[in-house]
Image (cartoon, rainbow, N blue to C red):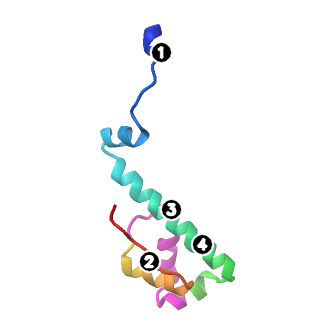
């Protein structure tokens, strides 16, 4: 690498890089799932809810709740998210930008 290239600042953003690698959408999806799992966990802690009570409020199994709270598990439905949000007194807001 020449001295001129070393001092050059790339105008490529991180999103540009991820897109060029073909992984932008997967990374965004994973980040959203992580954020939702963290927000649900935080809401449960604030309200002192155990996983068993939360699962009962959602009318689902504890195993299903574990999958929802696992940021590495990408499969989650809008219905499940909506029931989880409702169980902690919140709503889901989704928008296209």
Q: CA distance from mark 3 to mark 4?
A: 11 Å
Which x, y percent locates residue 75?
38, 68
Q: Single out the mark in the foreground, 4 or 1.
A: 1
Q: CA distance from mark 4 to mark 1?
A: 44 Å
Indicate the quadrant where residue 12 lies: top left
Out of 13 and 82, give the one closest to the viewer.
13
Task: Work out whether mark 4 precedes mark 1 in sequence or the reverse, and give the earlier one.
Answer: 1
Q: Vertical placement of 34 versus 65: above or below?
A: above
Find disc 2 in the rendering and name its residue.
Answer: 81
Quarter of the image where the N terminus is located: top left
Element type where label 1 sits in the image: helix
Element type where label 2 sits in the image: helix
> Crowding near pointer 3: few (<14 within 10 Å), some, many (20+)?
some
Task: Work out whether mark 2 precedes mark 1 in sequence or the reverse, and give the earlier one.
Answer: 1
Element type where label 3 sits in the image: helix
Q: Vertical placement of 2 versus 62: above or below?
A: above
Q: Which mark is residue 6?
A: 1
Task: Work out whether mark 2 precedes mark 3 in sequence or the reverse, and give the earlier one.
Answer: 3
Indicate the quadrant where residue 46 lies: bottom right
Q: CA distance from mark 2 to mark 1?
A: 47 Å
Find disc 3 in the rendering and name its residue.
Answer: 34
Which x, y percent locates residue 55?
53, 85
Find disc 4 in the rendering and name its residue.
Answer: 41
Q: CA distance from mark 4 to mark 2?
A: 13 Å
Q: Which residues are magenta?
A: 56-75
Quarter of the image where the C terminus is located: bottom left
């Amino acid at each position: 690498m020449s001295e001129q290239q070393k001092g050059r600042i790339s105008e490529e953003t991180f999103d540009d890089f991820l897109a060029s690698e073909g992984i932008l959408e997967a990374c965004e999806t994973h980040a959203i799932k992580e954020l939702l799992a963290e927000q649900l966990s935080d809401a449960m802690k604030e309200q002192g809810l155990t996983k068993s009570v939360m699962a009962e409020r959602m009318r689902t199994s504890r195993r299903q709740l574990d999958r929802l709270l696992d940021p590495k598990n990408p499969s989650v439905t809008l219905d499940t998210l909506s029931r989880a949000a409702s169980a902690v007194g919140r709503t889901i807001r989704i928008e296209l930008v």
